[in-house]
Image: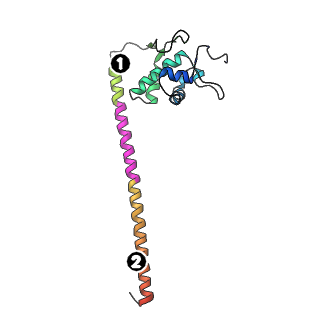
Amino acid sequence: MPSNIPSHTLAISEAAETIGVTIHSLRRWCEWHMAYLSPGANPVAGQPRRLTGVDIEVLRHVKALRSEGLQTVAINEQLAGLTFAEIDMDGHRAGDNEELATQDAPESPLAPPAAIMASEYFIAIERRFEALEQARQEDRRDRFDQLTMLGIGVCFGLLFCAILIGLAWLYGGSP
């Protein structure tokens, strides 16, 4: 094991099992939230991915925030204000110690639940907006397809009429 990786780490498969997510999800989360993880969570090519106790706690919190419907940007904003406790990887499995402490956060008259509720409200609005935007784009594509088919039909109709008029003129004189 390289000297810059702590001796008490978990392989990606062990970490995924500990956190309760797939290895694929954990790899993506390590990339998306790399600013809040140890270097071993996103090693250079060819090196094994190793996660520390702090990484496990950060990724558990990511899982909880994702289950609340938060997206990557919102999760990273929340992670920026948190400090995670180191867990003992030798003595017991991760999860026995789930401490989160706010780093340099002054006491605010606004209770955190109110801020979270407002955040969830804006996320719900954003999701609705994205769904409406996607529906609008699908409608635009459908209209384009319908107009294209109408244009093709008109062209074939005119071509058919021209052929009939040409045949009538050819075999019968004037139309």
Please tell me whether mark 1 sits on a helix, a strand or a loop. helix
| Closer to us: 62 or 23 | 23
Which segment is the magenta one? Answer: 122-141
Badge 1: residue crowd in 10 Å (few <14, some 14–19, many ≥20): few
Farthest bottom residue in view: 173
Give residue 100's quadrant in the image. Answer: top left
Placement of 84 over or under 139, stated as above or below? above
User: Is residue 36 at all visible to an observer of this figure?
Assistant: no
Q: Which numbered marker is on residue 173?
A: none
Residue named by callout 1: 112
Q: Nearer the viewer, mark 2 or mark 1?
A: 2
Q: Quadrant of the N terminus?
A: top right
Residue 161 image label: 2
Residue 101 is a magenta residue: no
Q: Is residue 58 left or right of residue 175?
A: right
Q: Amino acid at mark 1?
A: Pro
Q: Which label's residue is closer to the chain start, 2 or 1? A: 1
Please tell me which residue is depicted at 53% across the width and 28% down the height of the picture: 23
x, y percent for residue 140: 39, 52
Q: Secondary structure at mark 2?
A: helix
- Residue depicted at 41% across the width and 57% down the height: 145
Residue 29 vertical position relative to residue 166 in the rendered view, above or below: above
